[in-house]
Image: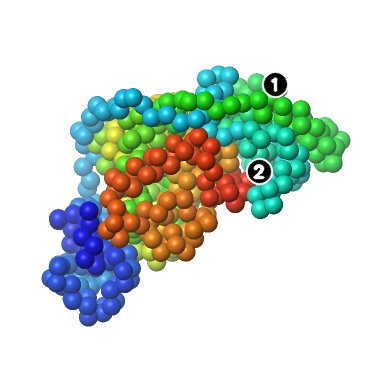
Amino acid sequence: MLNTLSSTMHLNAIDNVVIARAEIPEGTKLPDRGVTAVRRIPRGHKMAIAAIPKGEPILRYGQVIGFASVEIAPGDHVHVHNCEIHDFARDHAFGVDARPTEYIQPQATFQGIVRADGRVATRNYIGVLTSVNCSAGTARYVAEAFRRNPFTGDDGLLTGFPNIDGVVALTHKTGCGMATIGDGMETLRRTIAGYAQHVNFAAVLIIGLGCEANQIGPLMASQKLQPGMTLSSLVIQESGGARKTVEAGIARVKELLPAANAVERVTVPASNLLVALQCGGSDSFSGLTANPALGYASDLIVRHGGTVVLTETTEIYGAEHLLTRRAVSHEVAQKLLDRLSWWEDYTRRNGGEIDNNPSPGNKAGGLTNIVEKSLGAVVKAGTTNMVDVVGYAEQVREKGLVVMDGPGFDPVSATGQIAGGANVLCFTTGRGSVFGCKPTPSVKLATNTPLYERMPDDMDINCGGIADGVETVEECGQRIFDMILRVASGERTKSELLGFGDDEFAPWQLGATV
């Protein structure tokens, strides 16, 4: 249990900074740290507890998070004004910490929906997807005809079909003005295909315009999608225009309702969980509370035979050595380093750098640079072996901890994880992200108690008790694991109760728009 009398958190014995639990006014004496605050230290920010000469490393989590750009005195505020980042050696030590997974028997269970092919769903939606932005409005009109109102309880055309969670249109802003071959088109098609085949969809209708670069025919052929009762398409220019396509789409979905409703939840092992790990609107507490607690839950999922998927490659940068050290093979570790090299080149070619992340909100919350953010972010992945590294929106096939390549922008990286098969998503936030991601339920984890109390309709779990000294990481992690099982069994998350999740579908756009 944390020392509730201390106003700061010292994370590792070798750290030369501590984290303020609450704002520390200038001149405040901290007897337990042997220092006096020489200036105001905002809540969640870092304070030096020893002199740090210019050019010397600043240590948090027992790791280098940057270097002093000026002389830093004991009691001083440590942040962007006196901390700089540059390349430094990290020991990637491929596989040295890999250990056999200690599986738990008997496995935990949840109430899932078993599809005809044996895959297990946590939700039961009908999806209306689009090949191109030009068909977005048409798709939305189809889905709107079946929309449930979470505030009035009106089921509309879904009255009498209680086992269907909804009809959702997932639209995007691309599909034309792009090359018909290459990474951009391949990524878009792979993402759409991942959703079209997602286990949480009972059936999917894809709507296209007809003249777009991303034609439905080549999309279906390239991704080996087989049309049938549960996967069909409409093309506006071949169906008589938008109005007639909407009418045809509504009729098509109506035909699907009886079969989609004919499901029941049954007891299945937790090995059927494929949980996406996300963090957004992070603050300094993210790496102290919600992320390590989610990491503990991730270990439980893996030890029960399931899978967790870490993404946001730019938020692994600087902490990649913590993953390569527990890679199951040299090949898997090298795949991660190769993706990081790609990102360095990608940001350079586009006139940026990876340290453009963190965002202004992250910095206001106490995160100084990408290395500090990454060190706090990767702990979501727990301590088990890294078994695979996959490309964006690729199907996740290995059991255990998998890393998926993707950007740090949450809607884009989460879209990739869901395309890869995630049937539950856990999202930690310190600033207050409101996020839904149909057809996959999103569990929101608040990093601090003030946030949880300020946004009770959006946050599912408060992890702030860890910083408050009233709960351990392990206790909070167990609560998260228990809630994942309940959500997988059908319990609604806060974002689902609000009806969120229709607008967060955001495929990664690569290549030029012309």
Q: Position of residue 441 (x, y in %)?
A: 53, 41
| Residue 57 picture quarter | bottom left
> Which of label 1 and label 2 is nearer to you?
1
Residue on which the image places disc 1: 228
Per the model, the C-alpha gap separating discs 1 and 2 is 22 Å
Horizontally, residue 498 falls left or right of residue 393, namely right
Q: Position of residue 512 (x, y in %)?
A: 59, 46
For the residue marked with disc 1, what is the amino acid? Gly
Horizontally, residue 373 falls left or right of residue 75, namely right
Say if 124 sits above or below 10 in the image: above
Query: Is residue 100 something one can see in this rendering?
Result: yes
Say if 275 sits above or below 59 in the image: above
| Residue 357 picture quarter | bottom left
Query: Is residue 234 something one can see in this rendering?
Result: no
Q: Position of residue 397 (x, y in %)?
A: 44, 25
SS category of the residue bearing label 1: loop
Q: Nearer the viewer, residue 424 or 217?
A: 424
**Other residues around mark 2 within 10 Å, as few (<14) / some (14–19) / many (≥20):** many
SS category of the residue bearing label 2: loop
Q: Residue at x 77, y 32 (%)?
A: 254
Residue furthest to the bottom:
27
Horizontally, residue 60 falls left or right of residue 488, namely left
Residue on which the image places disc 2: 171
Q: Residue at x 83, y 37 (%)?
A: 247
Q: Nearer the viewer, residue 489 or 389?
A: 489
Along the polypeptide, which appears first: circle 1 or circle 2? Answer: 2
Q: Position of residue 279 (x, y in %)?
A: 42, 50
For the residue marked with disc 2, what is the amino acid? Thr
Disc ID at residue 131 = none
Q: Are marks 1 and 2 in contact (CB under 8 Å)?
A: no
Q: Residue at x 63, y 38 (%)?
A: 165
Q: Residue at x 55, y 19 (%)?
A: 117
